[in-house]
Amino acid sequence: MEYGTKAGDPTKTRTQCVVIGLYENNHLTASATRIDKASKGHIRKILKRGDIQGKVGQTLLLHDVPNISAPRVLLVGLGNEETADASRFVAVIRATIAQLKQIPAKHSLVCLLEASAGNKDLAWKTERSIEYFEAGVYSFDEMKGTNGDDSKSRPKNESVDFQLEDKNDAETVNLAIVAATALTLGIAAAKNVANAPANICTPTYLAEAAKKLAKDYSSITTTVLEESHMKKLGMGAFLSVSQGSDEPAKLIIMQHKGAGAKDKPHVIVGKGITFDTGGISLKPGGTMYEMIYDMCGAASVYGTMKAIAEQKLPMNVVGVIAAAENMPSGKASRPGDIVKTMSGQTVEILNTDAEGRLVLCDALTYIDKFNPASVIDVATLTGACVVALGTHAIGLFANDDTVANQLLAAGEDTHDRAWRMPIWEEYQTQINSAFADMQNIGGPAAGSITAACFLARFTKKYRWAHLDIAGTAYKWAGTNKGATGRPVTLLTQYLNDRAREPAA
Ligand code: BES
Ligand code: MN
Ligand code: ZN
C-alpha cells in the first residue's frame, strides 16, 4: 500500500473510510471527538448502546455517519489509556487491518497515531502501523493457478493516509514512512522466497535471487561460491549436507558497500536449508512439509540486505547465505561419518538431521576474512528452541555482552523480540566426541544451547551472536500460514543503530 499524511479536518476528508480510536471508559481520541461532535453525538450514542466498549482490538464499522464526508467510519477499541503499551498498539493495528481488508475501501484515513503506545513515540507508531498493515495485507499468490486465484475478487486496499494531530509532525511521520517502506519491502522479499516451496526455491534459486539484488541495487555486489570452490576451501561439514542431494550447494555472499573500504563490515549469515528431510536420520513424515521453511534464516538475511540497500544505509554489511538441501540417498552422509571443517576441527556426525550447524560452521569460518565488526547468524536451528521459547521470542546466544544487549534492544524497540540464553562452558562437554574434535548433537538436554555451543567453537575470532528462529520464522496454522519475515525488522534496526553510532 501507499502511505501519506493529512492534517486537515477528518470529518471533511474525502476518503472511503475514516478509522478512529476509542479507549475504554467512554474516552475518545481527538479525532473521535471531532467525528462525534460533527455528527451530533453519534459516536457516544453508539457507545452508550453498548455495541463497542473500547476493548483492545474490538472494531465496529459504521456507515453514513451524519455530517461526515467519508461513507464509512471504523471504530477501533484501544483499551485502557493508562496501561497502553507497545504490544497493545500492535494488537490495535492488527485488528484494524483485519477489518479494512474485508471492505472495498481503496483509500482510508487512519487516525490511530493519536493512540498511546506507552513510551513509544510518533515515528515508532508510524513505522509499526505500516509494518503490521503490510503484514495484514500480504498474501503469497505467486503459485496460484488461474482457477484457484481469488486475489482479483478480493477488495484491494491501495492507500492509507495518517491523520496528524499537529501539522508540524508531518516531517517526522513522513521520514518514518520512508524508513518503514524500505523495511516492509525487505520483509515482503524475505516472505516471498521463504514461502516458495522447495521444488522452486532451491539453493540455485536463492543464488539467482541474490544476483538479482545486485542488479537492482548499485550498492550490492553478489558472489556465489560453487561446491568445487567450497571443496578447495576445505568446507567438509557444509558439503557433507548437500552430498545426498541432486541440488548443488551454494555459498552466497551479498556485499552492501555504503561506507569506505576501511570500515569493518557487520556480517549476517543465514541458514539456507531449502528442504530438510533430516537426511539418513530421516524426519517423521507427519509434518516434514514444514521444512520448506528451513531456509528462513537465509530469507531474513536476503530481506535485510534489500531493506538496507533500499535505505542506502551508510555502512558496510555482508550478507551470507549457506544454501543446501538435506536429502537421504546412496550418496548421503551417514550417522557416524567424521568430516573435517574449514577450521581444521573435525566433527562426528551422529545425526544427519542436525545439519544446520554443519553448513553454518564452515560459513562462519569463511567470513572471518571480512574482518567483521560483528557477526550474527540466523537459523531455524532447533526444535528445542520452540520447546523453550515458543513462537514469540527469538532465541539469542552470544559470545559478547555488548552485541547481545544491542540485539535485545533492537528487538525490544521494534517489537521483534529476542530472549538471551546461556552458552556456558559447562554445556560444551555435551558435544565432546571420543573419535573427533566434537560431535554434532549433545543429547536431549538443552538442545538449542548445545547447538549454539557447537557454533561457538567456530566464532572465537570475532564478536558473534546466534539467533535461533525455529519458533518465530513461520506459522503453520490455517489461514495464518506462512513466513513471518522475522527477524528482518530486528536486524534492520540493529544495523541502523550501528550506522548511527560514532565509528569505533
Ligand atoms: N530444521 C531443524 C530444526 C527445526 C525443527 C526447525 C522444527 C523448525 C521446526 C533442524 O535441522 C533439526 O532437525 N534439528 C534437530 C536437531 C537434533 C537432531 C539434535 C531437532 O531440533 O530435532
Ligand atoms: Mn535437521
Ligand atoms: Zn534443519
Image (cartoon, rainbow, N blue to C red):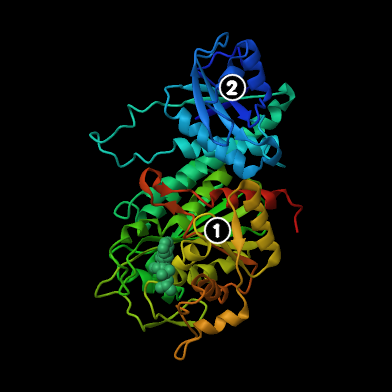
Q: Secondary structure at mark 2?
A: helix
Q: Position of residue 98 (x, y in %)?
A: 47, 34
| Left or right of 485 in this view: 4 | right
Q: Note whether 18 is above or below 270 in the view shown.
A: above
Q: In the figure, residue 418 lies in which quadrant?
A: bottom right
Is 179 on the left or on the right of 252, as rendered? Answer: right
**Mark nearer the viewer, 1 or 2:** 2
Where is residue 398? Give x, y as percent: 62, 67
Classed neighbour count for the residue bearing mark 1: other residues with Cα under 10 Å, few (<14), some (14–19), many (≥20):
many
For badge 1, the amino acid type reads: Ile
Callout 1 touching callout 2 (CB < 8 Å): no
Nearest to N terminus: mark 1 or mark 2: 2
Q: Which residue is mark 1?
A: 394
Report the side of 353 relative to 160 (left or right): left
Separation of marks 1 and 2 at Cα, in angstroms = 43 Å
Q: Residue furthest front?
A: 49
From what the image shows, is residue 202 above or below residue 232?
above
Query: Is residue 494 visible in this depiction of the protein?
Result: no
Q: Amino acid at mark 2?
A: Lys
| Residue nearest the viewer, comparing 339 with 130 | 130
Residue at 47% from the left image edge and 65% from the top image edge: 381
Task: Tell me which corner region of the image, top left, top right, bottom left or bottom right, holds residue 466.
Answer: bottom right
Q: Residue at x 48, y 40 (%)?
A: 135
| Residue drawn at (69%, 26%) of the image | 170
Residue closer to the observer: 163 or 401: 163
Which quarter shows the C terminus? bottom right
Q: Position of residue 182 (x, y in %)?
A: 56, 39
Disc 2 designates what residue? 48
Q: Is residue 90 above or below residue 399?
A: above
